[in-house]
Image: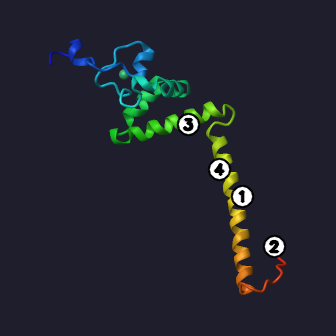
Amino acid sequence: MSGSNSEDSSSSKGRYACAACKHQRRKCKLDCVLAPYFPSNRSREFDLVLELYGVCKVTKLLKKIEESRREEAVRSLLWEAEAWEQDPVHGPLGFYTKLHQENETLKIMLKQLQHQIKCFHMGRGHRRIPCLIMPC
Ligand SMILES: [Zn+2]
């Protein structure tokens, strides 16, 4: 390796530019922080994240995070970007609201089933006692 201004030491020989560098029309260096997470074939994912956060913010964020957790962070960014793509009004809140409603429905169903089981045991399984609290 030669000095820091040598192109050979900083360029990525035999590797395509990552989606971020390709987008910015710059040379993808070996130490490009985005290259492992947004290779050239993941430009759609990169575009989604770019639209929401911008290259600078994503790069700064990834540099702050230890390398072992960056993949997880990128998945999280991508999940949020896809949520905004699918629901431009609510984004992740739309997913949360839907899951919250499903959870509430399931809680009610569980309560009804628990009540039915209780009624079943009270009737000893063969003689049904009419339930006055909740229809079962
Ligand atoms: Zn790059």
Q: Which amino acid type is marked by label 3?
A: Glu
Q: Which residue is mark 2?
A: 134
Q: Quadrant of residue 95?
A: top right
Q: Quadrant of ligand 1?
A: top left
Q: Could you say which disc has been placed on residue 63 in the image?
A: none
Q: Which amino acid type is marked by label 4?
A: Leu
Q: Could you say which disc has been placed on residue 105 in the image?
A: 1
- Disc 4 and disc 2 in contact, CB within 8 angstroms: no
Residue 59: percent from left, percent from top: 41, 28
Give SS at disc 2: loop
The residue sitting at 70% across, 84% down in the picture is: 121
How many angstroms separate mark 4 from mark 2 (CA)? 26 Å
- Disc 4 and disc 3 in contact, CB within 8 angstroms: no
Please tell me which of labels 4 and 2 falls first in the chain.
Answer: 4
Residue 85: percent from left, percent from top: 61, 30
Q: Which residue is mark 4?
A: 99
Assess mark 4: CB under 8 A from ligand 1? no
In the image: residue 108, left or right of residue 59: right
How many marks can you see? 4
Assess mark 2: CB under 8 A from ligand 1? no
Please tell me which of labels 1 and 4 falls first in the chain.
Answer: 4
Q: Which residue is mark 3?
A: 80
How many angstroms separate mark 1 from mark 2 (CA)? 16 Å
In the rendered image of this protein, does residue 114 appear above or below residue 81?
below
How many angstroms separate mark 4 from mark 3 (CA)? 15 Å
In this view, the residue in front, 68 or 44, is 44
Q: Which amino acid type is marked by label 2?
A: Met
Please tell me which of labels 3 and 1 falls first in the chain.
Answer: 3
Density class for disc 2 (Cα within 10 Å; few <14, some 14-19, many ≥20) is: few
Please tell me which of labels 1 and 2 falls first in the chain.
Answer: 1
Please tell me which of labels 4 and 3 falls first in the chain.
Answer: 3
Assess mark 3: CB under 8 A from ligand 1? no
